[in-house]
Image (cartoon, rainbow, N blue to C red):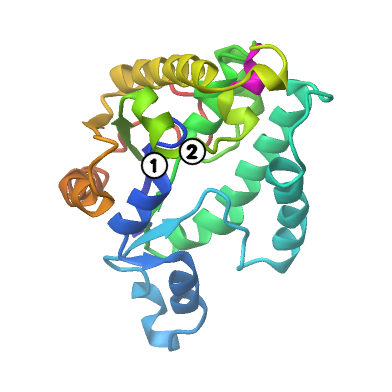
């Protein structure tokens, strides 16, 4: 039986990565090792019962060809610095290419092998943010048509100001560089709070439409304590996905409506 694809969603800095890592049973590298090295008779059950944390920035280790291309995409998307010289039309295409490659060669092989997968953000990185950058849902339906969508989503909500105060070291893109807040020097706490609050509202619209599970996070609560609370919800989502996906017919890239 194919595995279940679960996304942990929330605004920048809310703790998606740390929480997903705590909630998972094994890492991506461990899952791939089980996938590629088990004795032949065990291959059919290699992923049975395991929840794998797969970072959204993970480069494929199941395809050398995809890995080579994803290295270049990774450099452009996250390691090239921040400047407004190129329009959103350029960056949105790179994001679509990244998530397509990730879905096909990182997440896909694990799901096909029976692993359940949890990622630290998926829909937020394009739908919630891009709606504030001039794109419409119709635009995104075309651009992300073939990107695999989660079977279930858990949305984490938190006070955005408290999230900023906890971390502070956010990139200009997380402070609203692409959402019309002016010069790079003007970006800071105020733009972060406004930008992230607006993207949080977009996520809440999707949550209301599709009945996503939601959970409130106290930025001051230890990650391990929060993860223990969320583990109950994740277990429910994994069980519910066996009968019907939470987001409906979105496996082949239909935009949530």
* Quarter of the figure with the C terminus: top left
Residue contact between numbered discs 1 and 2, judged by CB atoms under 8 Å:
yes
- Residue under pointer 1: 7
Q: Nearer the viewer, residue 50 or 114?
A: 50
Residue drawn at x 51%, y 27% as measured from the top left? 254
Q: Nearer the viewer, residue 228 or 154?
A: 228
Residue 146 is drawn in which quadrant?
top right
Q: Tag 1, which secondary structure?
A: strand
Decide if residue 174 is on the left or right side of residue 101.
Answer: left
- Residue under pointer 2: 122
Decide if residue 35 is on the left or right side of residue 152.
Answer: right
Residue 193 is drawn in which quadrant?
top left
Please report the bounds of the magenta region as a residue range.
176-180
Crowd around label 2: few <14 · some 14–19 · many ≥20 (10 Å):
many
Q: Which callout, 1 or 2, points at the residue further toward the start of the chain?
A: 1
Crowd around label 1: few <14 · some 14–19 · many ≥20 (10 Å):
many
Residue 173: image x %, image y %? 63, 29
């Amino acid at each position: 039986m194919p595995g279940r694809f679960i996304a942990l969603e929330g605004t920048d800095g809310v703790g998606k990565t740390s929480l997903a890592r705590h909630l998972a049973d094994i890492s991506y590298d461990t899952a791939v090792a089980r996938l590629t090295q088990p004795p032949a008779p065990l291959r059919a059950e290699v992923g049975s019962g395991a929840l794998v944390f797969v970072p959204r920035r993970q480069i494929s280790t199941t395809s050398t060809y995809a890995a080579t291309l994803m290295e270049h995409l990774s450099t452009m998307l996250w390691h090239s610095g921040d400047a407004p010289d190129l329009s959103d039309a350029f960056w949105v295409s790179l994001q679509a290419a990244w998530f397509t490659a990730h879905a096909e060669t990182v997440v896909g092989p694990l799901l096909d092998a029976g692993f359940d997968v949890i990622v630290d953000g998926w829909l937020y990185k394009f739908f919630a943010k891009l709606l504030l950058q001039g794109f419409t849902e119709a635009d995104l339906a075309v651009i992300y048509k073939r990107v695999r969508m989660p079977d279930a989503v858990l949305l984490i909500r938190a006070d955005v100001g408290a999230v900023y105060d906890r971390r502070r070291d956010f990139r200009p893109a997380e402070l609203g560089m692409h959402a019309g807040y002016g010069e790079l020097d003007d970006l800071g706490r105020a733009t972060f709070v406004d930008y992230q609050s607006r993207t949080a509202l977009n996520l809440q619209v999707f949550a209301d439409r599709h009945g996503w599970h939601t959970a409130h996070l106290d930025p001051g609560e230890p990650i391990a304590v929060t993860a223990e609370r969320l583990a109950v919800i994740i277990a429910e989502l994994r069980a519910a996905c066996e009968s019907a996906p939470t987001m409906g017919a979105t496996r082949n890239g239909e935009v949530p409506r």
